[in-house]
Amino acid sequence: MPMTYDDFKLLGLSIDMTRGKPAAEQLDLSRALVDEAGTVGYLSRDGIDCRNYGHVLGLPEAREFGAQLLDSPAAQVVAAGNSSLELMHDALAFGMLFGMPGHEAWRKREDIAFLCPVPGYDRHFAICEALGIRMIPVPMHDDGPDMAFVEAQVAADPAIKGIWCVPLYSNPTGAIYSADVVRRLAAMPTAAPDFRLFWDDAYRFHHLTDHEHVSANILEACAAAGNPDRAFVFASLSKVTFGGAGVAFFASSPRNVEWWQRHVSIRTIGPDKLNQLRHVRYLRDRAGLVQLMARHRALLRPKFDAVTTTFERMLAGVPGVSWNVPQGGYFISLYTPDGLAKRTVALAKEAGIVLTPAGAAFPHGVDPRDRHLRIAPSFPNLAVVGQAAQGIALALLRAIDERA
Amino acid sequence: MPMTYDDFKLLGLSIDMTRGKPAAEQLDLSRALVDEAGTVGYLSRDGIDCRNYGHVLGLPEAREFGAQLLDSPAAQVVAAGNSSLELMHDALAFGMLFGMPGHEAWRKREDIAFLCPVPGYDRHFAICEALGIRMIPVPMHDDGPDMAFVEAQVAADPAIKGIWCVPLYSNPTGAIYSADVVRRLAAMPTAAPDFRLFWDDAYRFHHLTDHEHVSANILEACAAAGNPDRAFVFASLSKVTFGGAGVAFFASSPRNVEWWQRHVSIRTIGPDKLNQLRHVRYLRDRAGLVQLMARHRALLRPKFDAVTTTFERMLAGVPGVSWNVPQGGYFISLYTPDGLAKRTVALAKEAGIVLTPAGAAFPHGVDPRDRHLRIAPSFPNLAVVGQAAQGIALALLRAIDERA
């Protein structure tokens, strides 16, 4: 007899499925980064004493490493601290306080807006909310944002200063921006002359299948389209080595990098170059990183499979229910019938499974159809992930039953 | 025959005396922090995996360590990244964007001002300049800012939202705030209800003499005066361990720390806890830090002595020339006769000695009397520091001669 929701509750589980955190076994893959830290010393290839102040755009070899990863000239790549989120925050804060290069500070205008493909990344939206930036939801397809909608919006409204993009294995829908979408984003006319693509290339190397999709080179696409300053590219090693102690990168046009340097030089005398040095010595080059990511995939893939096969077994054919089978990244999106996402989260919680709040993937936390759930299978161990997926499915089925 | 300025030029030296950077021999004192990094592991005392995301206010034991250093409750101390400068920048940026707790964002007002004791720290003033904050120079005495001036200003002008303070061994004059000055700063009525002391306790443990002066506990002083939210305290291990890879601290009232957490949580998922763990394990406690600082002092004191004894030998009695003999910190201030600082810097440069630009210690880089020079003796080796002091003295004497 299959397990019921009430049976599941009796298991008395306590599982946290809220955040896309690497599991300890993933962090262990980079054990050498801790264990052999003492062998790295403090002198860079160029003889820079990484212990001391300076090099506000990062250690040259860390910038070169980032340049390999992002297929961009090292002079256009900044190696920074442990968080790409803080680079995105600061880019927006600099826009608000100082303005984009050659343009007035956004704080001088009444209305500043951003396009937000939904479902999207809650922390992107939280920055906009904090800064008082009006968020315009954009329908998301499997190949990226709805471009007809995007083009119409940016052509008409000069308050729209940017769009959030996770171009590969998008958080949380797994969307992969098509070449056509990328080209249109790079080329579209915008009413705001200081419009920016906030290009969060978080999952560039985070494949879950043999088909290693390639992130478009948005800097080249923008330059080719005559909009060389349009893209701010963000990337991070947080889901490569350590969530809290990786290295983040910012890449953009020479003019934007000069702008970044000007403002960030007021803020700090430089990033932690010792951590950058350790990372470059440990990962060595792009090939080294790609090898490491294959080992992440070996750990992550079974967890994603455990969720999607459980959903397939328990939810296939249930009217109004669907989910994606991501080819990379950290999340699975589960869609309930309209109006049941919050109730499913509440029922899952009663059954011992903490999910990201329903609506989290939408601006201001409001999913207008109350149907989207973000599932983060990376952190718990494999056995638990399968159980959690079962519990989530049971909670959803119970929510449907309740309404019947 | 004593060396002349022209003799000195012929030596063809190239000496950088611009910034208060630790010398390599100082960084070597903390060699174990690099060499033994592999033995620290990644688990905190409390079992926190320091490799992963989280703990936005810092690792609990790092906060407790900071609390020991700052004589404050750990709950009121934040352990952050590698730079206290960036904490100061962000506190001001948050004020501009969001406002102090319970008050409107500064960006909504036409005029925001800060009191700037001069000479002061150029990077403090650069933040204000970048943010468009009006800077009001305040005369500086040996016991701190001119309090009659400060009290009159803050009582009268609600646009004044704060004052920059380096309370111990002040950058660059070596001033030591007296207990009376501290009490008056904590207690003075201010027209702005959201007035803040930006308390940059950069040199709290950086003594150069046997008399280890004690930084006042400004948080307690403010609380006692009925202004519990008035002080933002900043401190850093950059001049304890590594200039570019230390740990910075922010301490304030519970209300201000809650405010900080709210805004910084939008910016980042947390600081580099591995570096915090390494620091706590290496320095152990306040006593461990104090021992290390004694070794810094042994390296730094002869360099400061080389400068001041050279000045004493070559400049004593020269009309209009004076300097301070600091009891701690990183700088010596040399005062030329009015109008000769810039010329002295230019002559020193011709003789191979790069000094901080004249005026750097003043808002917008303008010393109204053009007489202040900031000497940073820490970075070059001892033999070179003595030579540099000689060259600076000769450049100053030549500048005086030129005008005679």
Image (tube, coloured by chain):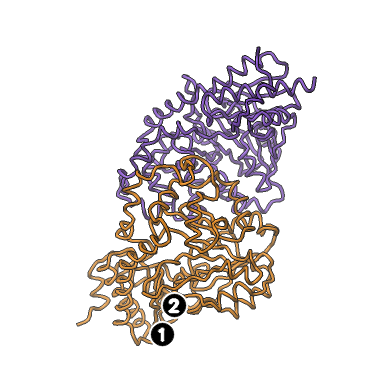
Chain colours: A purple, B orange
Q: Chain of mark 2?
A: B
* Farthest left residue in view: B1
Please state the horizontal and vertical placement of residue B127, each as a whole percent of the image.
54, 60
- Residue B176, placed above or below residue A397: below
Residue for point 68% across, 75% down? B156
Judge by depth and name the residue closer to the eye, B387 or A362.
Answer: A362
Residue for point 33% across, 82% down? B315
The quadrant where residue B385 appears:
bottom left
Judge by depth and name the residue closer to the eye, B375 or A281.
Answer: A281
Judge by depth and name the residue closer to the eye, A157 or A18.
Answer: A18
* Farthest top residue in view: A1
Q: Amino acid at mark 1?
A: Gly
Please state the horizontal and vertical placement of residue A256, each as a whole percent of the image.
51, 46
- Where the C terminus of chain A falls, by quadrant? top right
The CA distance from mark 2 to mark 1 is: 9 Å
Estimate how packed mark 1 is, as few (under 14), some (14 to 19) or many (20 or more) residues with alpha carbons within 10 Å. few
Residue at numbered disc 1: B320
- Residue A178, placed above or below residue A199: above
Q: Earlier in the sequence, mark 2 or mark 1?
A: 1
Task: Report the number of numbered marks.
Answer: 2
Does residue B213 appear in this view? Answer: yes
- Tag 2 secondary structure: loop
Q: Amino acid at mark 2?
A: Arg
- Residue B205, placed above or below residue A323: below
Q: Are marks 2 and 1 in contact (CB under 8 Å)?
A: yes
Does residue A249 appear in this view? Answer: no
Residue at numbered disc 2: B371
- Where the N terminus of chain A falls, by quadrant? top right
Please state the horizontal and vertical placement of residue A394, each as a whole percent of the image.
67, 21
Q: Chain of mark 1?
A: B
